[in-house]
Amino acid sequence: MVSRRMRFGIFLAPFHRVGDNPTLAIERDMKLIEWLDELGYDEAWIGEHHSAGWETIASPEIIIGAVAERTKHIKLATGVTSLPYHHPLLVAQRFVQLDHMTKGRVILGCGPGALVSDAYMMGIEPTHQRRRMDESLTAIMKLLACEEPVTMETDWFTLRDARLHLAPYSEPRFPISVASSTTPSGALAAGKHGVGLLSLGAGLHGGPKMLAEQWRMAEAEAAKHGKTMDRNQWRLVVNLHCAEDDERALRDVRRGEEAETLTYFSETLGRPPMRSEDPLRDGLAAGSTLVGSPETVAAGIERLLSFTEGGAGGILFRAHEWADREATWRSFELFARWVMPRFQGSLKMPLASREWASANRETIFAPSMTALKKAFHDAGQEAPEFSRLQLHTGKVELLKG
């Protein structure tokens, strides 16, 4: 059963244009996470990349360690750790340490590595990456179980009588999720190990329509291995920009999105699979990109969730710089104030209380006139000539403009 309180957060690759001061960009990323913590967002996922100039965080673990000192509540995740690039014992040890340092606020996001140029520099063949991710995750899960020493031999790492020297802070361990984009491998790996699913493909052209099938594959694979999948640990990653109205939202992002598409995804990466020629136009039509007023964005989330055929536990918004800093921060604030509560159950009681008071206003509030007159009388004063209490019985039409 999916929790009535949906989690929201960001997926911070990050994306910074080449030419932007990288030192300032990293600091800006950390300040954004601080702002999201203040606004009540649940999670921030930080990426790992090593080439191509735009996605400039090489070690999300270092960012997590720094940001943990600046924040109070938000959970901090790797989005994602490219497992084929690291020895699994070191991954497990580092995350256990972060689990202690954050007192249970860390999440391990796993993937095979997104940028082919990263793997190329390390001499890793793309055809080996997904297999290596699964082998590494197998080792990590055994190590985190803290049951017995782990011995394991592959063509790229060896574990010999290996064990952690600290147990996880979280009980029984911190959450783990596997990234899934355009192939079935991520969903199958999540199912095999019974961990969370991070659907990056939800933000790609045609991605929302594939969500339900991805989940069915994960559930079927989990059943084969005696595991179960939990929809509360399923997160969808999409694009977002929220403004006061639809026209302004589109105006905010159009030029920045076009620059990102042309200079990074087309000219630098050669347009990766499933990325359309006009991602903004096609994303709005497909539901993978949510740009508009709070009402429009809320409707987009409802539509996105309908593609899952049962719901998901969280939605992450890809952190981009399509708009300027002020508009971007304002977008996250508008979403937190006017959209987030609709999906977290926090409006139910205030709305019910308001409806009760409105429906019973004559019974409840009319006697106040008698009380006012009595107050003057008790003070030895003559009550002013109050007109009859006027109670509005229809809807109020707010002025526009």
Image: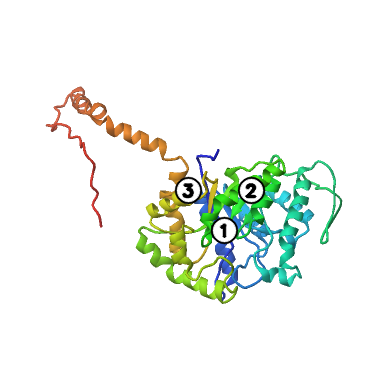
Using the numbered discs, state the Cα–Cα distance from disc 2 to disc 3 in whole angstroms: 18 Å
Secondary structure under badge 3?
Answer: helix
Q: Which residue is more in the foreground, 202 or 68? A: 202
Give the quarter of the image for residue 56.
bottom right
Q: Could you say where residue 366 lies in the image, as x and y percent from the top left?
A: 21, 28
Label 1 sits on residue? 201
Q: CA distance from mark 1 to mark 3?
A: 16 Å
Q: Quadrant of the N terminus?
A: top right
Residue 19 seen in this snapshot:
no
- What residue is disc 2 on? 218
Q: Quadrant of the C terminus?
A: bottom left
Q: Amino acid at mark 2?
A: Ala
Tell me the quarter of the picture where residue 293 sits: bottom left
| Residue kind at label 3, given as amino acid type | Ser
Give the x, y percent position of residue 96.
73, 49
x and y, in percent, of residue 61 in the image: 68, 57
State the residue at coordinates (59%, 74%). Answer: 270
